[in-house]
Image (spheres, grey):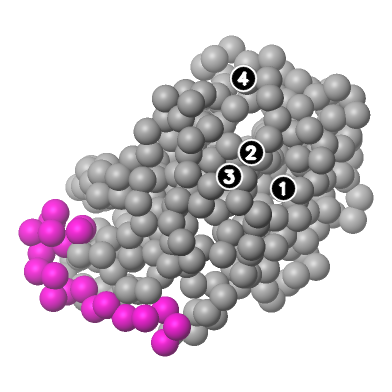
Amino acid sequence: MRAIIIGVDGLIGKALHANLNQKAYDVLGTTRRGGEAAGGDRLFLDLSASSLPSLPVTDVAIFCAAMSKFADCRNFPDLAHRVNVTGPLALATDVVERGGRVLMLSSSIVFDCLSPRAEADRPPEPRCAYGRMMAEAEAGILALGGNVLRLTKIVTPESGRLVDWTGALKQGQQLRAFEDHRFCPMGLENAVESITAVIEQPDGGIFQASGADDISYADAARHLADRLGIPRTRIDGTLAVDHGVPQNENTPFTSLDTSRLSALTGYRPPRAHDVIDQVLAGAFADIAAS
């Protein structure tokens, strides 16, 4: 199977490229970093451009690129709409018209995030600009007969807030973390395996991959402190709304129901504490080596 990954130099794109190569796929990837697109299996593509080139003929195109920061989507709506909606839908239409399939990665932010484990067939109710754009893009992909895979927060031992916090706690620093802003962590390998399973099955529609439960950033920081043997008093719990986070961008719940994916692959959503422990184990090694 020939696959092209839109956004191959991102967190998910890079890991997916390696995974598909191991499975003997013929894999191409797009990047907007011109220096990395000089040849080989990398093609230059900037989704924010006013006109986009046709992609090579491919069996499946996986859209991993997005402008996902809430503030960027709020402050630069036209640019974000081109990257998140207009560009991907134009490319996806071209792929489908030439006989290929498309899979777009999306997010639980298409829902209102006011209740846990949102089901895939629930109508989107986005409360923020990013969520509205992703809901619009989803509708376009589904109209083409494509697949949407919604994901919750991916955390890794190599980078991210949990890794930064681990280092800060080990260095004796005090942390401030939100009590009212929650996330539902899952590992990068969960996402990559889910993407691969979806593109290898024939049906269109929506799949969802998620962690098992939501956890506040403050409770995640306290769990890190517990594992490190550091007093919880080093964690200052605070409210996101008191620190400039707009109410419509606050996420009390982001977990998703994974019934369809679980029926396909046996997927079991990982518990938040287990995912954090995996990050901590990897971060220990990274900190020790630095």
The answer to if 143 sits in the magenta stretch is no
Residue ID for mark 1: 138
Q: Amino acid at mark 1?
A: Glu
Marking on residue 254: none
Structural crowding at the residue carrying mark 4, measured as other residues with C-alpha within 10 Å and reported as few (<14), some (14–19) or many (≥20)? few
Query: Depth check: 42 or 124 in front?
Result: 124
User: Tags 1 and 2 in contact by the CB under 8 Å rule?
Assistant: yes
> Which residue has dot 2 on it?
206
**N-terminal label among 1 and 2:** 1
Work out how far the residue at label 3 is from the one at label 2, CA to CA, in angstroms. 6 Å
Q: Report how far apart the C-alphas of labels 4 and 3 lie in the structure.
A: 20 Å
Mark 1 falls on what kind of element?
helix
Q: Which of pointers 2 and 4 lies earlier in the amino acid sequence?
A: 4
**Kind of residue at badge 2:** Ile
Label 2: element kind: strand
Residue at the image position 30 percent from the left and 45 percent from the top: 271
Query: Could you tell whether 33 is left or right of 98 in the image?
Result: left
Q: Earlier in the sequence, mark 3 or mark 2?
A: 3
- Label 2 crowd bin: few (<14), some (14–19), many (20+), radius 10 Å: many
Name the image quarter holding residue 230: bottom left
SS category of the residue bearing label 4: loop
Task: Tell me which residue sits at (13%, 76%) in the image.
Answer: 233
Q: Is residue 108 left or right of residue 62?
A: left
Using the rendered image of the protein, determine whether residue 76 is visible from the camera's viewpoint. yes
Q: Which residue is mark 4?
A: 200
Most common secondary structure along the magenta stretch = helix
Choose the circle earlier in sequence order: 4 or 3.
3
Labels 4, 3: front one:
3
The span shown in magenta is: 223-242
User: Which residue position holds label 3?
Assistant: 120
Tag in front: 1 or 3: 3
